[in-house]
């Protein structure tokens, strides 16, 4: 009888702990699909023109173009192009080197202007954190400080993609 009781106790205790191998690690979310983006926000534009143009570089190498209008029903997102695997890896590596900072006007003594478009260049970390590495605002070129070579190279690539998007929209070759 003691043996039967002991066997039942062991069976019951093992069933209570089945599938519970201790604390489970939280699942690791996949990296954010967007690794970098650039955007131009125009303030005084005709109603039929896009007020915001966004170019996003995805981890897959796909580059998406989004046009946002005053009339949201006209908004469009399309695949603009696919980058080579080498350039995609380079962009991912540059983003990994970007560190947080704040935008600074390197020439505060120079005059600015009003009503100019706002252009933004951002690195997007795996967790979705966006770090603005440079911006054109009020006719001033703002740079993130501290700044490193990765910031400058990523800004150059994003500027080229914005220029390409603008050329595709307007038919004007830059």
Image: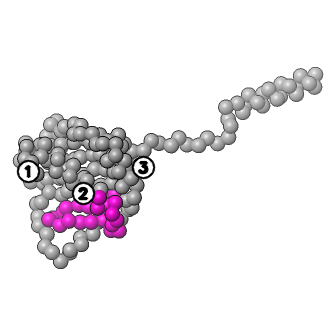
Mark 2 burial class by Cα count in 10 Å: few <14, some 14-19, many 20+: few
Question: SS at mark 3?
Answer: loop
Mark 2 — residue? 156
Question: SS at mark 2?
Answer: helix
Whether residue 37 is visible: yes
For the residues labelled 3 and 2, the Cα–Cα distance comes to 23 Å
Whether residue 149 appears in magenta in the rendering, the answer is yes
Q: Earlier in the sequence, mark 3 or mark 2?
A: 3
Q: What's the residue at 73%, 31% (across, down)?
A: 16
Mark 1 — residue? 45
Q: Which stretch is magenta?
A: 129-153
Mark 3 — residue? 127
Mark 3 burial class by Cα count in 10 Å: few <14, some 14-19, many 20+: few
Whether residue 11 appears in magenta in the rendering, the answer is no
For the residues labelled 1 and 3, the Cα–Cα distance comes to 34 Å
Q: Earlier in the sequence, mark 1 or mark 2?
A: 1
């Amino acid at each position: 009888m003691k043996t039967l009781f002991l066997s039942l106790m062991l069976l019951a205790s093992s069933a209570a702990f089945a599938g519970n191998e201790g604390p489970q690690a939280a699942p690791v979310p996949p990296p954010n699909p967007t690794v970098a983006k650039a955007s131009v926000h125009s303030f005084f534009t005709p109603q039929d023109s896009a007020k915001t143009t966004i170019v996003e570089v995805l981890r897959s190498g796909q580059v998406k173009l989004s046009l946002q209008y005053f009339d949201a029903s006209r908004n469009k997102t399309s695949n603009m192009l696919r980058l080579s695997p080498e350039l995609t890896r380079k962009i991912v590596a540059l983003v990994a080197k970007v560190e947080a900072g704040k935008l600074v006007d390197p020439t505060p003594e120079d005059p600015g202007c009003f009503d100019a478009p706002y252009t933004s260049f951002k690195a997007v970390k795996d967790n979705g954190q966006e770090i603005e590495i440079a911006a054109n605002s009020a006719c001033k070129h703002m740079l993130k400080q501290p700044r490193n070579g990765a910031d400058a190279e990523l800004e150059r690539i994003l500027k080229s993609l914005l220029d390409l998007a603008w050329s595709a929209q307007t038919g004007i070759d830059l």
